[in-house]
Amino acid sequence: MRVDILNALDSNGILKECKASSLKKHIANRLYEVKIPTKKSEKYRYFDIEDFTSKDLEVVSTSKDKFKQQGKSLVIEDGEVVSAPEGVEVEIGEFLDVDNDHFDGLYYLNHLLTQNAIILRVKRDISFNIKHIFNKEEVFLNYRVVIFIDANSFVEIYESIEANSKDSQILSGYDIFLSRDANLKFFKNQTLNENSSLPIFTNYFKVDSNATFKYGTFDFAKSSGLNLFKSELHSNSSFNAMHLLFTTSEIKAGTISEIVHLDKSSKSNQMAKNILTNGSRGIFDALIRVTKAAKYTSAHQNSKAILLDSKSYMASKPQLEIYIDELEASHGSTTGQLDENALFYLRSRGINKAEAVKMLILAFANEAIEFVDNKEIANHIYVDFEKAYYGSSDIECIKTCHECEDMILGS
Amino acid sequence: MSKLEIKNLKAKIGDKEILKGLDLALEEGKVHVIMGPNGAGKSTLSKAIVGHYDINVTDGKIIFKGKDITNEEPEIRALEGLFLSFQHPVEIPGVNNAYFLRTAVNAKRRYEGKEELNAAEFLREMREIAKEIGLKPELLNRSLNVGFSGGEKKRNEVLQMMMLKPDVIILDEIDSGLDIDALKDVSKGINKLRDGKRSFLIITHYSRILDYVKPDYIHILMDGKVVKTAGPELVEKLEKEGYSSFEEK
Ligand SMILES: Nc1ncnc2c1ncn2[C@@H]1O[C@H](COP(=O)(O)OP(=O)(O)OP(=O)(O)O)[C@@H](O)[C@H]1O
Ligand SMILES: [Mg+2]
């Protein structure tokens, strides 16, 4: 289907066109209000969303509910669960309880087209992986993952993507419900090869009272893609996000987000680091809204971009929308070149310019990768970063891996 | 024979001429000292020698070991054996100090056709030198100069100098802001590298360091030129009379 035609329909028409059950009327109503994004949509202004919405492709969704439950990974291949991790309840079923106040039309579209969501219930402390595999060519792959995390659980998720297909588009995302006092670390590694299918992930996170959510996204892609989320913060909860984007070809990629402080004493901290080369475009359009009820909150946001050539462009738009006085808030955005003084210092010690540039870029990225406090996951991310930078990775330990330096120096 | 020769050097920063036809020759194995009032152009000279992007050389020549390096890339000057200890070493977040130093040492070894040092060899030597010059070992594993005290930065410059073993060493106010122990440590490092071949150019405002590092020549730099060159005895006269008596009429 072509999704942009939905903008001409009323909510009944949308339901019908999406072949959605009448139980999803409320979702169709919301899509009718928010609309499928066009190039005029504020948040999608810097992304060629029409490439996504105007193609007439066959919709492919989750249909099977047979899979192996083994190991520590949820593997989703072309929308179908092929294996699920032990220790997590996984069910394929209808999901209706969507966010009624999401900014993104594609979020609602994604739900309307998803007859069967992949629903995970996590009831204990656990660490597992989620891997998406895209193989099918020329389809509109549409599926969603819902994760319920029980109160007091400590959960760590590492998400990665293996995009083998071309000419498809992927619409997916998570609804994550983090119960009271739960603790989630979610690290997303979205590194795509050249000419890969175009993925858009559009998410909703509910962070309940006293819960803590640490969210890191890492994108070293050679193909365009977008990650959108809305994160809702309840009293005393905390949301800490880091986004690292490194692009090496003429693509458009980034983060579009809204963090909403709904209740008092909630904390948010969002940092975006972007390194752009070869005429790429980075996007960071991020709003933090502090509602009237959210007294004594703290909200911090920052975006830094390094442009390595004059053709690259950073569309950075951090925004704070505040309706109260009692809070601590800051935001900022810088875009520039590498620090010339630092570059000179390295060269004055005999390090050639290309190598010195690499060292400074790695240093800039390191600060973001260090956000990942799980060494194994951090290493995966280092390797992908190196591959993106050098074209290959030979983590011959001492040369690149700081952990090993630590070990030797510390001994 | 001179190791480094500067001939009629004129240089601008922006539109402002700072070096105005400066001549200086560093002899093999000797310690030269430059003194001069604030703003005279001492740091500008040292930066011009190592090829800093701020300095626009408009005339004159810099000859290093017989080669004209006036327009050479900074890394080539370094690999050829020039070293400047900066008056204000830059802080570089995210670049590990030891990793940086190993990259530099191995770049030089490769340039000289030698085999790279392996990790263990490198670490042993680095630790040994750090200890010798009183550099706290934890600083080796921190981001380069980030949060280092003034004295720690200077010690770190000396560590680099001792690891890289350059042929001509320029020290821009290496002694400023050092406590007496640090001054002794730094001087020890310098003296250790004095081998009768290496040449030193020490830029300083104080005679204090010269109690520990015995100089061969004193040059006075004023208003972009070397206005006087003499033996160590010149320091005493300077201390008594200040710079005014050297002003060009
Ligand atoms: N980046 C710059 N931009 C503009 N002017 C500069 C710059 N750096 C130095 N200058 C000017 O050049 C002149 C010489 O400065 P330089 O740092 O070489 O002096 P110096 O002899 O090292 O002084 P000090 O003893 O204070 O270190 C001064 O007038 C200074 O203001
Ligand atoms: Mg100076």
Image (spheres, rainbow, N blue to C red):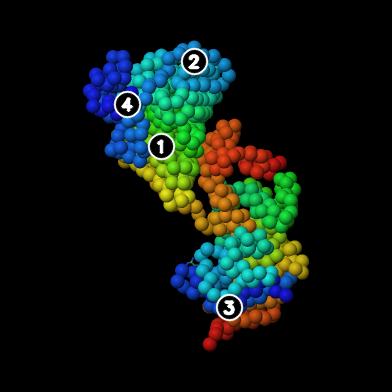
Q: Secondary structure at mark 3?
A: strand
Task: Choose the circle earlier in sequence order: 2 or 4.
Answer: 4
Residue identified by numbered label 1: A255
Mark 1 vs mark 3, foreground winner is 3
Q: Residue at x 37, y 22 (%)?
A: A58
**Residue A277 placement (x, y as % from top left):** 47, 46
Q: Residue at x 40, y 30 (%)?
A: A200
Q: Are marks 3 and 2 on the same chain?
A: no
Q: Chain of mark 4?
A: A
Q: Secondary structure at mark 2?
A: strand
Residue identified by numbered label 2: A89
Q: Is residue B136 above or below residue A255?
A: below
Residue identified by numbered label 3: B8
Mark 2 vs mark 4, foreground winner is 4
User: Which residue reaches farthest right?
Assistant: B195
C-beta proximity under 8 Å, tags 4 and 3:
no
Q: Chain of mark 1?
A: A
Mark 1 vs mark 2, foreground winner is 1
